């Protein structure tokens, strides 16, 4: 089935969330085709999603593809695109909408993104306003990571953050349309022509930084990236990965987070730049750890953060 918009959703052991996401898309059924890729969940997720698709009568526009091996989020999204191309004899949809499995869309979310792109042929990628179920806004548009932003995120000192405000990765929240460096892949709509210049997502990112890398590659080819807050998508933060949580103590960052960060810097800026970024983050973070108890600040960092950072970035066999 050929559709105007391919919706790519990658599932790993969160079938119920995916079903809720699909149900939220029913009003857009006339213009979409949803491909859910089950990334070798091993818990029957794929079968449960397939059963729900039949039970809710949405099989005309939604399907599940089950992979035998989990090669990561980017690879899963690429598999969704490959499936759509396979069944449409190589004909690309006009747009690809990447949605996290732990999202559900508000009415009109897709229409707002499509309307914006219709007005702006120079824009290749647009992102939604992400929010909690109660409407509380989340960060969803960002600046590219840099040497300056790494130092700022490590040192966590007000005067430094003010001096480097133009480099802070997550700027203050806004409800105004604006051009940005990159948008969250939890809801990211990409024009077909972008893929002719950039190809698919870099599957060497297992999880994290893949959408940052993709937006940077698109920008280097002349495409613009915009944030469109009239498109509202609920994001249940951390429910699909378990890495970032709001209602529990921080968890230790997995090795793939450090590998993805390392790949982003080395691939896009070179090894020397990556080394400087690593060193400045570590310098800033060391001063923060020394300063924190003196200022009475809570320790909200993931366990073993500094040791894991050093191991993955400075020791043999790391990231």
Image: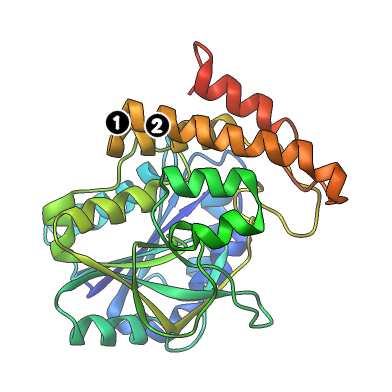
Percent position (x, y) of residue 173? 54, 75
Question: From what the image shows, is residue 282 above or below residue 288?
Answer: above
In the drawing, does residue 185 fall left or right of residue 150? left
In depth, the one of 145 and 12 nearer the eye is: 145
In the drawing, does residue 6 fall left or right of residue 159? left
In depth, the one of 241 and 35 nearer the eye is: 241
- Residue displayed at 28% across by 53% down: 216
Q: Quadrant of the N terminus?
A: bottom left
Mark 1 touches mark 2? (CB < 8 Å): yes
Assess disc 1: are there few (<14), some (14-19) or many (≥20) residues with their C-alpha within 10 Å of its C-alpha: few
- Residue displayed at 44% across by 62% down: 184
Tell me which corner region of the image, top left, top right, bottom left or bottom right, holds residue 277: top left
Report the number of numbered marks. 2
Percent position (x, y) of residue 218? 21, 56
- Residue displayed at 17% across by 60% down: 194
In depth, the one of 55 and 216 nearer the eye is: 216
Tell me which corner region of the image, top left, top right, bottom left or bottom right, holds residue 237: bottom right
In the drawing, does residue 33 fall left or right of residue 197? right
Residue placed farthest to the top in the image?
Answer: 316
Tell me which corner region of the image, top left, top right, bottom left or bottom right, holds residue 273: top left
Q: Which residue, given by chain and number where applicable, does mark 2 sit on? A: 274
Which dot marks residue 135?
none
Visible residue check, residue 26:
yes
In depth, the one of 126 and 221 nearer the eye is: 221
Q: Give the secondary structure at mark 1.
A: loop
Question: From what the image shows, is residue 318 above or below residue 300?
Answer: above
Percent position (x, y) of residue 312? 54, 23
Visible residue check, residue 302:
no
Q: Which residue, given by chain and number where applicable, does mark 1 sit on? A: 270
- Residue displayed at 32% across by 47% down: 79
């Amino acid at each position: 089935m050929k559709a105007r918009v391919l919706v790519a959703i990658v599932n790993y052991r969160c079938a119920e969330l995916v079903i809720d996401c699909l149900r939220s898309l029913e009003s857009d059924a006339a213009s979409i085709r949803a491909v859910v890729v089950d990334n070798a969940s091993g818990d029957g997720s794929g079968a449960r999603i397939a059963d729900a698709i039949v039970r809710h009568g949405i099989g005309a526009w939604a399907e599940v593809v089950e992979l035998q091996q989990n090669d990561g989020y980017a690879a899963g999204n690429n598999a969704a695109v490959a499936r759509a191309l396979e069944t449409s004899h190589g004909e690309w949809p006009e747009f690809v909408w990447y949605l996290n499995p732990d999202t559900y869309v508000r009415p009109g979310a897709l229409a707002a993104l499509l309307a914006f792109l219709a007005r702006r042929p120079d824009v290749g990628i647009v992102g939604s306003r992400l929010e909690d179920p109660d409407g509380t806004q989340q960060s969803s548009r960002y600046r590219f990571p840099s040497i300056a932003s790494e130092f700022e995120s490590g040192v966590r000192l007000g005067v430094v953050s003010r001096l480097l405000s133009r480099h802070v990765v997550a700027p203050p929240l806004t409800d105004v349309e604006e051009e940005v460096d990159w948008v969250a892949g939890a809801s990211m709509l990409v024009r077909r022509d972008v893929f002719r210049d950039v190809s698919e997502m870099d599957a060497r990112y297992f999880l994290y930084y893949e959408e940052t890398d993709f937006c940077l590659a698109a920008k280097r080819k002349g495409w613009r990236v915009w944030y469109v807050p009239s498109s509202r998508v609920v994001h249940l933060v951390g429910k699909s990965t378990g890495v970032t949580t709001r209602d529990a103590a921080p968890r230790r960052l997995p090795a793939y987070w450090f590998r993805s960060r390392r790949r982003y810097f080395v691939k896009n800026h070179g090894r020397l730049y990556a080394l400087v970024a690593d060193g400045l983050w570590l310098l800033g973070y060391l001063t923060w750890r020394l300063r924190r108890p003196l200022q009475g600040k809570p320790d909200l960092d993931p366990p073993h953060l500094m040791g894991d950072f050093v191991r993955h970035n400075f020791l043999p066999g790391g990231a």
